[in-house]
Image: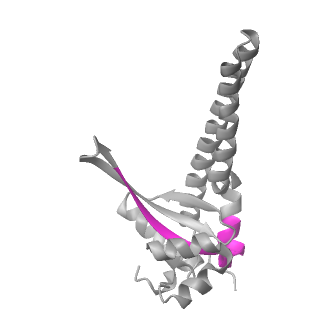
Amino acid sequence: MPVKRDFDFERIIRDTCWKNKIGAIAGIVVLFLLSIFFIYFGIKIPFAPILILGLLPLGGIALVVYRFRGDLKGEDYWIDELVHHPERIAWIKPVRVQHTAYYVVTLYHESYYQLLDINGLAIMIKCNSPEDQLLFLRGVKRYTPHAHIGFSHVVQSLYNRNPAEFIRMVTESRAYLPVGTMNV
């Protein structure tokens, strides 16, 4: 049964996915230009260590592409997953990032929710204001009531072991907390 669309929720997903995709592409471009710079001067000066240094950013590009492959899919992919294939979203993971000075004083924190799917892809959705958090939680409750919400190291290890079987494994471990049971 198709879900009733929530365009405010979808706007949050679209905006965040677009920003994340642009950030990942910018990182790839910077690493590529850095690689070209070092390779060019390694050939121009004939100095092997500089040439080898130019190959390191190419490895960085591979890491960025792997780490941010969910971001690189873009907003259309994630909206399609939520609207047409919500069963593929397995886990909604709350993430809180603290920014500190000298590892002592907390300057500020940011709140995110990470959508993780059965293919091992993930996207971080920034929700700092209480209004955005409520809008996001209502949206995932509407679109993905079956998905697990919450974090524990056990849940993380189950997802890392097999994202496609995550819901079954987390249910068997009795750690399953479906989004549909939340009061929002």
Its colouring scheme is one colour
Which residue sits at x=63%, y=47%? Answer: 21
- Look at the picture and state if 43 lies above or below 178: above
Closer to the camera in the image, 45 or 74? 45
- Look at the picture and state if 180 lies above or below 94: below
Which residue sits at x=70%, y=55%? Answer: 73
- In the rendered image, residue 59, in percent from the top left (x then y), is placed at 68, 39
> Does residue 68 show up?
no
**Image quadrant assignment for residue 78:** bottom right
> Does residue 99 show up?
yes
Which residue sits at x=55%, y=90%? Answer: 172
- Can you say which quadrant of the picture contains the C terminus? bottom left
Q: Give the mark count.
A: 0
Q: Residue furthest top?
A: 45
- In the rendered image, residue 151, in percent from the top left (x then y), is placed at 44, 72
Which residue sits at x=24%, y=46%? Answer: 104
Residue 105 is one of the magenta-drawn residues? no
Closer to the camera in the image, 119 or 136? 119
| Apparent side of residue 107 relative to residue 110 in the rendered image (left or right) | left
**Image quadrant assignment for residue 74:** bottom right
- Can you say which quadrant of the picture contains the N terminus? bottom right
| Apparent side of residue 28 relative to residue 173 in the rendered image (left or right) | right
Q: Residue furthest left?
A: 105
Closer to the camera in the image, 104 or 54? 54
- In the rendered image, residue 100, in percent from the top left (x then y), is placed at 30, 45
- In the rendered image, residue 164, in percent from the top left (x then y), is placed at 68, 76
**Image quadrant assignment for residue 54:** top right
Closer to the camera in the image, 15 or 170? 170
Magenta range: 79-98
